[in-house]
Image: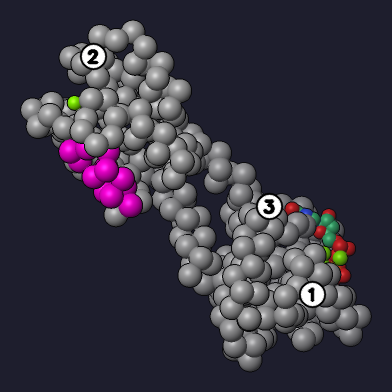
Amino acid sequence: YITKENKQAYHYLKKQLTRLPRNEMVKVLVVEDSRHARLYICSLLYRHKYQVLEAKDGVEALEVLQQHPDISVIIADNEMPRMKGDELCAEIRRLYSNEDKVIIGVSGSDSPHLSARFLKSGANDYLRKPFNPEEFYCRLSLNVDMLDQIATIRLQANTDYLTKLPNRRYFFEHAKKYQRIRTVNNQASQVAMIDIDHFKHINDNYGHDAGDDVLVALAQAFDKFFPEQLLARLGGEEFVVYFNDNSEQENTKQLELFRKYIELNSASFTTHNIPFTVSAGFVSMQEPKIDELLKEADNKLYEAKELGRNRVIL
Ligand code: GH3
Ligand code: MG
Ligand code: MG
Ligand code: MG
Ligand code: MG
């Protein structure tokens, strides 16, 4: 179910940032037809505590990649039966993003064209056999650093800096996928927009920093209440939840419980013991555009404000 995968992908990014010691978390696939050369490269990798997988040729390598989606480095020989190293490179690049996988070509051939051929096929680096182990480790490590940097930037681009919830950009990217899947399955899309009541007063009375604390505390409660749903801070003191679950009754019940929980407990879980309430607008629509969905939820939210706040409008 793609929505779960999206959520997992996000948590995977988060985990990648905190991983230590690094090498033990990095899965390397060694593709080599010569048993002797394969064992040698594997032994170098083991010595630096990388996780190692092996394949005898390109066809086998593609199977192993399919079974282990978390492989992040592929070290590929060139002269192999069934599929040459640069052909394997091109095929990997066709199937997997270069933001997730690094390919390092190796060959004993003295052809001056081979390194360029590997790089043009999508390899990130090339080593001529026999290579110096120190150089091997350095190039490997630099390439893994690059994957880490890409993951860091990707995570930062999708995370709200203050609350650490997924941000607006993440929400719109994934809401589109949610919407498509739900339309295909003939399920309604259900969304709620949640907004803090009189937040301006909190800033005015307690200061902007205290206001920030309230936002963080609310985000944490929100995440705890709806662990399986797509959540985001849309901006300011406005949050959104796109429900995975189908039961409208269950979703609106949870939403009402959340509102009540904030009303009763906010004073105890905010750093400066600031009591506050939230209003929410809930919508369920068949085959909506995301903009329509949010517009409708926003209308309901407006109604909740008009009627006196601290309530959910369905
Ligand atoms: P309502 O009940 O109608 O929603 O009233 P409100 O005061 O909550 O809404 P309004 O839109 O008038 O004010 C929202 C305020 O939120 C204004 C803005 O300064 C403040 N705000 C937006 N982003 C942040 C933030 O990141 N930190 C803090 N502390 N305040 C923020
Ligand atoms: Mg070979
Ligand atoms: Mg407002
Ligand atoms: Mg508000
Ligand atoms: Mg607002």
Q: Quadrant of residue 17?
A: top left
**Picture quadrant where residue 271 is located:** bottom right
Q: Is residue 176 above or below residue 126?
A: below
- 179 above or below 163? below
Tell me which numbered mark, 1 or 3, is placed earlier along the sequence.
3
Please tell me how many numbered marks the rendered image carries: 3
Task: Count neighbours of disc 1 (C-alpha within 10 A) and say few if under 14, some if 14 to 19, many if 20 or more.
Answer: many
Residue 246 drawn at (x, y percent): 59, 84
Q: Is residue 195 left or right of residue 47?
A: right
Residue 176 visible in the current orientation: yes
Q: CA distance from mark 2 to mark 3?
A: 47 Å
Graded by Cα atoms within 10 Å as few (under 14), some (14 to 19) or many (20 or more), the crowding at tag 2 reads: few
Q: How is the image coloured?
A: one colour
Relative vertical location of residue 12 with respect to residue 219 in this rendering, above or below: above
Q: CA distance from mark 1 to mark 3?
A: 18 Å
Amino acid bearing label 3? Arg
Q: Nearer the viewer, mark 1 or mark 2?
A: 2
Q: Residue at 26% across / 48% down in the picture?
A: 64
Residue 265 as seen in the image, left or right of residue 290: left
Q: Which mark is residue 169?
A: 3
Q: Indicate which disc residue 297 carries.
A: 1
Residue 131 occupies which quadrant of the picture?
top left
